[in-house]
Every structure is written in C-alpha cells, then in structure tokens.
Amino acid sequence: MATEQELSDFLKSVEKRAFKRSLYHVRNEEAALDIVQDSMLKLSEHYGDKPVAELPMLFQRILSNCTLDWFRRQKTRNALFSNMSDFEGPGEDGMDFDLLEAYSGPDNGERAESAEDETTRAQTFREIETEIQELPARQREAFLMRYWEEMDVAETAAAMGCSEGSVKTHCFRAIQTLSKALKAKGIEL
C-alpha cells in the first residue's frame, strides 16, 4: 500500500515524461497538461491505496485512456463546431525537457564537448524527436513505453490493452521507420 509520500514521489518522478508523451500525441501544450493532471488525479483518487510497484503500470494505462478520451472529445467538438481548430503544433519555446534527456547522459566531466559537438547532439535529438512524432500513434505509444519508460513487453501490453505480440510488432515497425528516416537524414545511431 502506497503512503501519501510514496504516491507524491511517484507522481513527481513521472510528470515530465508523462507531459512529453501526451504532447507527442495531442500536439497541444495546454491539452497535454490537462491530460497529465487528470491522469494524476485519477491515479490518486482511485488507486492511491495500491502497492507502489503497481503504480507505474496503472498510471500508464490511465494516461493512455485520458489521451483517448481527449481525442474523443475533440472529435465530438470538431463535428459540432467544424470551424474550431484546437490542434496546434508543439511550440519550441518554454520546453525545458528534451525527449532523450536520459540518453544524453549527465555531465560527469568525462570529457568536455566542444560547442560544435553539443550543437550536433542537440540537432540529432531534435531530429529524433521529430521522427518520433511522425510515427503512427500505436507505434509511438509502444516505442515510448518500451524504450523511454523502460517498461517490459508484458507491462506495455497491459497498459496499451493489447497482446504482447502486438507490442513487439509496433516496436519493431517503429524502430524500422525511425532507423530508415534518420538514415535518410544522415544520422547513424
């Protein structure tokens, strides 16, 4: 059973990644914030008494469902008010969290990077982010859960509501698409 402090610590640990994941899906910062807040509230209200080990998978499932609910509401709203356009591309201002921040590694002083190396790395990360945004929704979701959230296949399948085989297929296709797109841009990983 999670204590109030453990639940709070868990939510703090996932908020930035959850926001970025939502932003990839809805491409609207305000909507992404709302989705993450709704997800956190639902987790706290309905599952706050669950063991800490169950919180990551529960939260991912709730976040996915809240995102789908947002799309359903948008579809209904757009059908009723066809001249309203709530879809905006993500802005580049105010973003203090890079997609692959975890992969860039901490500055351990192992070697000083030149300004050119840092610029090249930043450009590469932006290209990767752009290509991830272009993936089909289910591939993007599976890819982010598996390789960014570091969930295993079974956890990802449970969170996405599909079979483990589907998760593997989505991830394989996402990796193939990303690899091909990045290679076409001259980026070899």
Image (cartoon, helix red, strand yellow):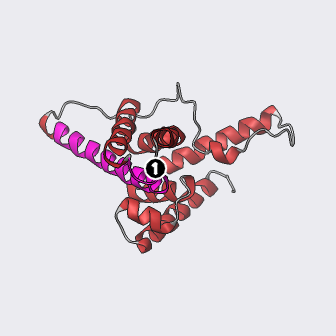
Q: Amino acid at mark 1?
A: Glu
Q: The magenta stretch spans which residues? A: 49-78
Q: Main secondary structure of the magenta part?
A: helix
Q: Position of residue 7 (x, y in %)?
A: 46, 42
On whether residue 76 falls in the magenta region, the answer is yes
On whether residue 141 falls in the magenta region, the answer is no
Q: In front here: 6 or 141?
A: 6
Q: Is residue 95 left or right of residue 74?
A: right
Q: Position of residue 26 (x, y in %)?
A: 37, 41
Residue 186 seen anywhere in this rendered image of the structure? yes
Check the image and report above or below for 78 versus 103. Answer: above
Q: In front here: 46 or 18?
A: 46
Check the image and report above or below for 171 versus 70. Answer: below
Q: Quadrant of residue 167?
A: bottom left
The residue at the point 46 percent across, 63 percent down is 155
Name the residue tied to disc 1: 134
The C terminus - image quarter: bottom right
